[in-house]
Amino acid sequence: MGHLWRFYKGVFRIIMARYLQYRTETVIWLVQLVIRPVLFLVVWSAAARTTGGQLSGYTPSDIAAYFIIGMVVHHLVVAWPMLGWEERVKMGTLSYLLLRPVDVIHRDIGENITFKSLTLVVIASTAIALWFAFDASLRVNPASIALAIPAILLGAVLFFVVAWTLAMAVFYTTQIDAMNTAFFFAMLLFSGQIAPLALMPPAIQTVAPWLPFWWYIGFPIEVILNHFTPIQVLQGLGAQLVWIGVVGVVMRAVYRRGLHNYTAVGI
Amino acid sequence: MRYLRLFRLFVRLGVMGEMAYRANFFIHAFECLISLATGLSVLWIIFSRTPTIHGWTWDELLAVLGLYFLGFGLIAGVVGPSIKQFMTDVWDGTLDFLLIKPANHLFLATVRKILIWHIVEIALGATLVTVSLYRLGERIGLEQASMFVILLVAGGVLLYAFWICLGTLAFWTTRLENVLLVFYNMYEAGRWPVGVYPSWLRYSLTFIVPVAFAVTMPAEAILGRLTWPVVLGSVALAIPNLLFARWFFGVGIRHYSGASA
């Protein structure tokens, strides 16, 4: 365990140095992260005002709270291991990583944690600014905030295993862009990024709980918003764990098979 | 005429470049279809809860979405990649090759590199606009149609001028490629009529990044929501902007020292 801890500390230092070197990239990334929730927030608020001030109990202030918290949750949960993997396999740099005594996944996990903790300050201050700009409101309940912590953590783990599993396709094809696009499209529809589940058409409301997407974005947001009883939250955390278990097993299997399939040129 | 021929040549070069990677074309076409599906599903989801958004109906927003795609296809397919190439040339010193060609430099710099698969977006955008106009049919008179065309051209000119200025900045600074990405992200906001945004965002989308002129205003024109003073006003804004961009580009070129000189 000790050597793994040292490894993580090393990754943290390397990645931090890299991000501090390219500070403008952070601005780009911030604009990308902010623009979509702001658009949905604005449009749904406009819709709520047209229909008499609220939609299924959501006032414009509630909608603002949902999307601003959603932006932070999205930031904490979503990662892009697919991009890194494409380069690793195409360029063969994976070979060096495989030679190391620590599994590749630890590097990805470390990189992720570093990036998120570094940018959390930026994203939190942006969220606070938006909170006032759009007059969001939230009835804070300490219990729901406390329960949100495991919900977000499990959400992040669930997204990570899902994304890693998808990234393994790079061992079989060099064109993974189309697959990523399709994945993020499905995710947009079912994850609660477009709207809280209560505002979605009935068809999506029925399907979403049976897919993994909503469990790592919509569920943590609504836990923070105090929409569930403690029992419901525990059931939800259970659902997240089941998904992590199922996808985790698949991930291990495709990772092993993928590595067998991997051939590096020039070694 | 000569420039039309040159443009056709660039298109042909784009097609030839793409033919070498045919699978690539289909993947990008697929991505365009997904982004259309995204736009339509979002509209469908929101309109399942409300009859109008800020006074816009489903059919009207279809026109906005269509114009958004049309504009995006033209920028990401022609002007964007050309300007990006232009910036790289300035930094590498390979702009010399462009400058010795016997044609207008501004023209070469802004249309010479064409990513052909964006034709899918342009086609989808045009289809959406057509469908929307067909469904709104009886409401559209000759006056609105002419306002629409005028605003479309004026909005296009403003965006074009904006991109020329962005590209020209490459003569003085190297930290710009990211600015192009920021533009593409800001352009996302064009999916919705700018009227729905709070005023600070609306003004930046109108006067800093001219998305409102290119997308929202032509849509408003065809729906008969604009008056002639506004239409003429945007023309009055577009012409000096283009002249300024041209002048600024010239200043930049004179500032360029070249790789071998």
Image: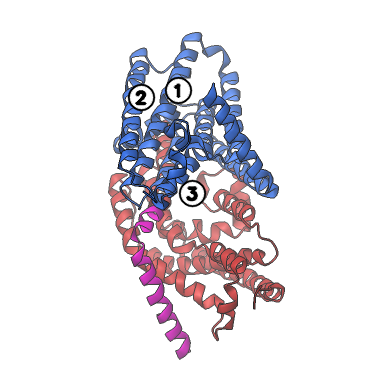
Disc 1 crowd rating (10 Å Cα; few below 14, some 14-19, many 20+) is some
Please tell me the numbered disc located at residue B238.
2
Magenta stretch holds residue A207: no
Q: Which chain is blue?
A: B
Q: Residue at x 45, y 34 (%)?
A: B192
The C terminus of chain A lies in quadrant: bottom right
Residue A139 visible in the current orientation: yes
* Amino acid at dot 3: Pro
Please tell me the numbered disc located at residue B228.
none
Asked if residue B108 is positioned above or below residue A58 in the image, the reply reads above
The one of B74 and A71 positioned closer to us in this rendering: B74
Q: Which residue is mark 1?
A: B153
Question: What chain letter is assigned to the residue under label 2?
Answer: B
* Amino acid at dot 1: Val
**Badge 1 element:** helix
| Pointers 2 and 1 in contact (C-beta within 8 Å) | yes
The one of B6 and A233 positioned closer to us in this rendering: B6
- Coordinates of residue A181 in the picture (x, y in percent): 59, 51
- Coordinates of residue B261 in the picture (x, y in percent): 36, 48
Asked if residue A138 is positioned above or below residue B225 in the image, the reply reads below
3 and 1 marks on the same chain = no
Q: Which residues are magenta?
A: A1-30
| Residue at the front extreme of this rendering | B261
**Badge 2 element:** helix
Q: Earlier in the sequence, mark 2 or mark 1?
A: 1
Look at the image and give the colour of chain A: red
Q: CA distance from mark 3 to mark 1?
A: 39 Å
Callout in the foreground (3, 2):
2
- Coordinates of residue A75 in the picture (x, y in percent): 43, 60
| Pointers 3 and 1 in contact (C-beta within 8 Å) | no
Please tell me the numbered disc located at residue A196.
3
| Residue at the bottom extreme of this rendering | A2
